[in-house]
Image (cartoon, rainbow, N blue to C red):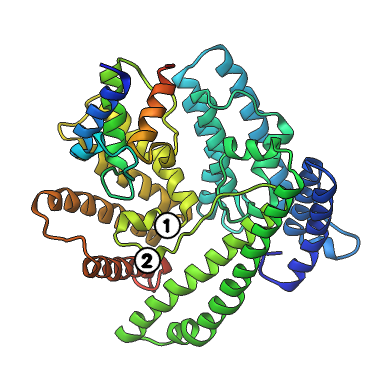
Amino acid sequence: MIPYATFTYFGVLLYAVVPAVLLGMLFRRIRVWILGASLLMILVQYSRGLVAWPPTLGREFWLLCGYALFQLVLVSAFIRIRQRAKRRGVFIAALTLGLLPLVLAKAQPYLAPGSLWGFAGISYVTFRALDVIIGIQDHTITSAPPLELAAFLFFFPTLSSGPIDRFRRFAGDWERRRTRAAWLEDLDGAAHRIFTAFLYKFILAALIKRYWLDPAAAEHGLWATVSYMYAYSLYLFFDFAGYSLFAIGISYLFGIRVPENFNRPFLATNIQDFWNRWHISLSTWLRDRVYRRFTLAALRGRWFKDDRTASYLGFLLSFGLMGLWHGTRSFYLLYGLYHATLMAAYELFSQWNRERRVWGEGLGWRVAGTVLTFHVVCFGFLLFSGRIGPDHA
Amino acid sequence: MSTAETVLNVLAQVSRTEAVRDHLDLRLYDQHLLDSLATVRLIVAFEEAFAIQFDDVEFEREDWATPGHIVAFMEQRLGK
């Protein structure tokens, strides 16, 4: 069952959410129910046979369980080793092992067509698991009790499509004892987000899809493609931002204040600004974990004559990875390379502009920047949609 | 030279903005005075200035939002 997509799902969701609200009113922590509700919802989400009688647990469910066991063992083993010594080789081995199930799941269509090696959300869970492994190496995470770790990795509201929370932030909420006021505040945050989510996903995105995107998709020619580009970009935003708001809103009901994922991205005045506003949990993950680490290593080691070379390669690495993270189709990679190029070009331009002051600061310039960024970004989504590009049949 | 002075010297140099010395509440990222590359340059410059090595570079932008934030962050890191 796809989360936040059907009314059946919302019906089932009440069984997880109503107790969470009531327990939250009675107790300062509801950790047992975070685990219980996650297990319940995972059973519903990953076992199609559950609604039949006798109920059967599907392959996807068992793959998820196997994956969970694997990551828990990996993290516990890595913590033990790290406590004794900091070794780069062990760290790289742990990262590689942590990434392996995702790589296999992505490679499955080429290695074993027709089989199933992953589960919905494996990319998101894997990025959360790597966050823990990196934190252990940096010694910002010194303990990860199995239940807490399982709750973090498989917290059901954000399981299948994010946002990607961070373990240190999650751990704070996991330990938090809520007062009645804090419980009310969470409830308020949840209600606000859930209603906005309904507006975005079930009204705006649905209308755009039905009256604009689907008709444009059926037509051919340049203007149909241009129309499709706008429709797809707006649809993607309202659908995904709506989805994220559901996930965040439901999380609040459990006292877990998952970070925001969108901040009015189409008002961005430049491409760098856009990536601080679009799919924020993924872009900050890549910025801090991939770009920052890579460029830092390059600058410390003086790998390149010019710092900017390191920065460009850092962009290429993080956005290339972002493309692959979405899937192995060539248009995803193209989408990543497109944004890496834009980021590098923007960095070059803004440095040049600091001296020359060609691009000004006033309202007119900001509007121009917003319009330009919007179009550049929409073209990126057109690539991402696969309607044009190398794979297009 | 105090930690705060050194931090502000380095920051003024990396951000190429003298105003950071007197405006401790300047929003560095919002005002486009710092970006991703400048953040990394700043880390390396601090490491050289204080002869240290950061183990943990996973801090959020909010931790370095203004010159005041950065001074407080560095004072805490250096255990002062």
Residue lying furthest front in this view?
B22
Residue A28 location, x and y as percent?
79, 41
Q: Nearer the viewer, residue A143 or B38?
A: B38
Q: Is residue A78 above or below residue A129?
A: above
Q: Is residue A201 above or below residue A126?
A: below
- Residue at numbered disc 1: A277
Residue A258 location, x and y as percent?
60, 49
Q: Nearer the viewer, residue A147 or A199?
A: A199
Tell me which corner region of the image, top left, top right, bottom left or bottom right, holds residue A149: top right
Say if labels 1 and 2 share a chain: yes
Q: In the image, is A89 to the left or to the right of B26?
A: right
Amino acid marked by disc 2:
Leu
Q: Chain of mark 2?
A: A
Q: In the image, is A117 to the left or to the right of A325?
A: right
Element at badge 2? helix
Q: Nearer the viewer, residue A148 or A92?
A: A148
How many residues crowd mark 2 within 10 Å: few (<14), some (14–19), many (20+)?
Answer: some
Which residue: 40% across, 28% down?
B72
Which residue: 49% across, 83% down?
A214
Q: In the image, is B73 to the left or to the right of A337?
A: right
How many residues crowd mark 1 within 10 Å: few (<14), some (14–19), many (20+)?
Answer: many
The answer to whether residue B5 of the structure is visible from this angle is: yes
Number of disc labels? 2
In the rendered image, the quadrant that contains the C terminus of chain A is bottom left
Residue A306 location, x and y as percent?
16, 35
Element at badge 1? loop
Which residue: 74% across, 38% down?
A177
- Residue at numbered disc 2: A267
Residue A170 location, x and y as percent?
62, 40
Q: Is residue A104 above or below residue B78?
A: below
